[in-house]
Amino acid sequence: MRKETRLRTTPHCRGATTERYLNRELSWLAFNFRVLEEAYNTANPLLERLKFLSISAVNLDEFTMVRVAGLRDQIRHGVETPSQDGLTPKEQLKAVNEASLHLMKNQQSCWLSLKRELKRAGVEVVSAKKLTKTQLTWLRAYFMDNLFAALTPIAVDPAHPFPFLPNLGLTLLFELKRKSGGKKQISVLPLPPKLPRFIRLPGEAMRFVLLEDVIRCFLDALYPGYEMLDSAFFRIIRDSDLEVEEEAEDLMRYYENAIKQRRRGRVIRIKALAPVSQHLVTFFSAHLGTTEEDVIEVPGMIGLAALNELYDVVARPDLKYPPYNARFPERISDYNGDCFAAIHAKDIIIHHPFEAFDVVVQFLRQAASDPDVVSIKQTLYRTSKDSPIVKALIEAAENGKSVTALVELKARFDEEANIKWARDLERAGAQVVYGFVNLKTHAKLSLVARREGEKLQEYAHVGTGNYHPNTAKVYTDLSYFTCDEILCHDINYLFNFVTGYAEPEKFEKIIAAPNHMRRDVMTLIADEIAHAKAGRPAAIWAKMNSLVDARIIDALYEASQAGVQIDLIVRGICCLRPGVKGLSENIRVKSIIGRFLEHSRIFCFGHGAGLPSKEAKVFIASADWMPRNFDHRVEVMVPLLNPTVHAQVLDQIMVANLRDDLKSWRLLSSGEYERAPVKDGGFSAHDYFMTNPSLSGRGKALRKESARPRMHLVRPQE
């Protein structure tokens, strides 16, 4: 059993990087350290810091379920092929385990610190040992009324096999002995996931007791006639990735079965609340088919992801961010809420969460009820459980319109919800397709065909994020609406490709993966190299979630060596090493971690005029620069040609992100991150967007203003 040891804040190990590339897994862990740093950041409200801690715990769980599980699979199958940074799977796993242990140590330290600060603020998580008799009396009644019936103690002996424990499940383990004498007995008590983790005590004070502590208080009700000799508290993490078999003819049925198998995936990691007896660790790990090396002893609290529950139940607005109500685009209001009329007049781009996702919902609801709308085509990658998007599509199908829904069953951890929506859409009469077996459809597209006069007019929505109204409140994304004839035809061809394998020879405006995006991005970078060599201004600005692809990184290195000025905003994984003399000295990389999750993908190329400029080529996309996005997904990259939309994305959004210093981190050539230096009181892009309306959404309101809001970029060297 391993105990955590303190390491440096940024994950790194000797030999973990080459001169050209940073390790993908360690770069992801570095991102999660930056998330955790926001939990330590006293500039954030106290409960928001608690939420950042919860997010970092959720992130680490998913990383373990997918990435760590993948490395272990490679090792189990004897794979020794090194990653692009030169590490074998064994070397990566060793480095990842070391960094993960350090991250968990920091998470627990953060929790203990926040717990003390919360107590001073009037929100206390108390130990059951400190409860008064009156409180214990109330708590026993609560236990019997609300918990007892849901708990099932399971003895482990030849007549009672060790129970199945679900992924992320919490389990109490007890060593018992009859008071009247007899052999020792081990009992397993799985905690039902639907039970609250934090139980509030009565009274005006906000005092909570953890579920596991409450259960320990009343073991006499669960085990009458027994005394407890020892106990342990565990949490398990299972391999939760899914593999698709090409020969799976019925993709829906395959995924229904695969989701059930996920719940029974191999155990990857076990966390035990410290202190814990060695013999209970041995017993537990042996019955789960793991070794004691897979058990990590954690002081403090197991399952920090549950802190999000505490954030939700504590009604203390003074300890949270001030409420923010997203603006509804005034352009739509100018046309009395008629989305089609507003889009027909001029392209419009919506900047979420600063502008409401409701406009996307309204666009589809209007399409569903408009008698002139003939058909709707829609991709669904992730959406909410109570999705207004799906409801609008169902309404449209019931109204007799032709509805085609491309439901992506391979959206990790959302497969189950997508299966449900697919069934509901089919019952309503929509045509549901699941794309390709070997390609994930990641593009975010809506296409509406509406009869106007003697022809069908198409209206398109292109998003950088998912059709998910909940995440749209916290993810920064872009929604682009257009009725451009050529662009809409391109999108129609893309739908036909996915639904009927009718691959177009070329697209006129959009850039699509897997067939053309890598080639076209490489060409755009090569064009900047040519401009630099010809003595013209040459620049690339790119914003994405992850930068991993070695061929793209090499092209950026070549561009840097040619003199192209490159600024990258990469929220999470970045395998490129910036600032290396002779390799990447003209490349700067930053990461923004703040109130909202940076999610939009924006790519800008100076086109011989530098950046920012009206001549620049500006694109939004559904794709990051990763091998999977270029080669194994259906993605779309769309040019922004309307001057107002172009200006909003380039001169406002990108410049604000590059100016941000209050929530920014700079990637050093060593692979470590440091906070950006703050100048003149600092600048927050998120604060700017919350207080400055966008350009294309203003409509008549913008024309009434004496001057349009415009950002000015101070170059990094200045």
Image (spheres, rainbow, N blue to C red):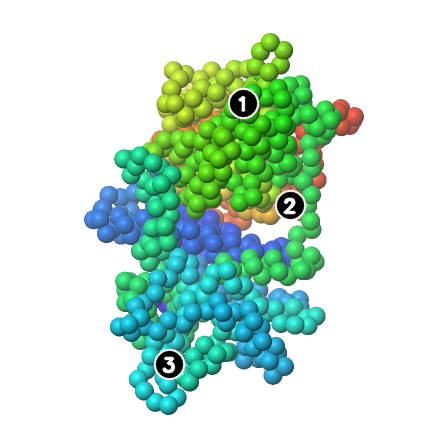
Residue that lies at the very extreme toward the bottom in this rendered image = 180
First-in-chain label (3 vs 2): 3
Pointer 2 local density, CA inside 10 Å: few below 14, some 14–19, many at least 20: few
User: Relative to the observer, which residue lies in front, 614 or 428?
Assistant: 428
The quarter of the picture where residue 521 lies is top left
Pointer 1 local density, CA inside 10 Å: few below 14, some 14–19, many at least 20: many
For the C terminus, the image quarter is top right
Q: Looking at the picture, how far across and down is residue 665, in whole percent?
A: 52, 46
Residue located at (65% from left, 68% from top): 206
Please, what secondary structure does the residue beneath circle 1 have? strand
What is the number of the mark on residue 176?
3
First-in-chain label (2 vs 1): 1
Count of marks, rendered view: 3
Q: Disc 2 residue type?
A: Gly
Q: Looking at the picture, how far across and down is residue 515, in whole percent?
A: 37, 24
What is the number of the mark on residue 682?
2
Numbered disc in front, either 2 or 1: 1
Q: CA distance from mark 3 to mark 1?
A: 66 Å
First-in-chain label (3 vs 1): 3
What is the number of the mark on residue 575?
none
Residue designated by label 1: 375
Residue located at (79% from left, 26% from top): 704
Position of residue 622 relative to residue 523, above or below, is: below
For the N terminus, the image quarter is bottom left
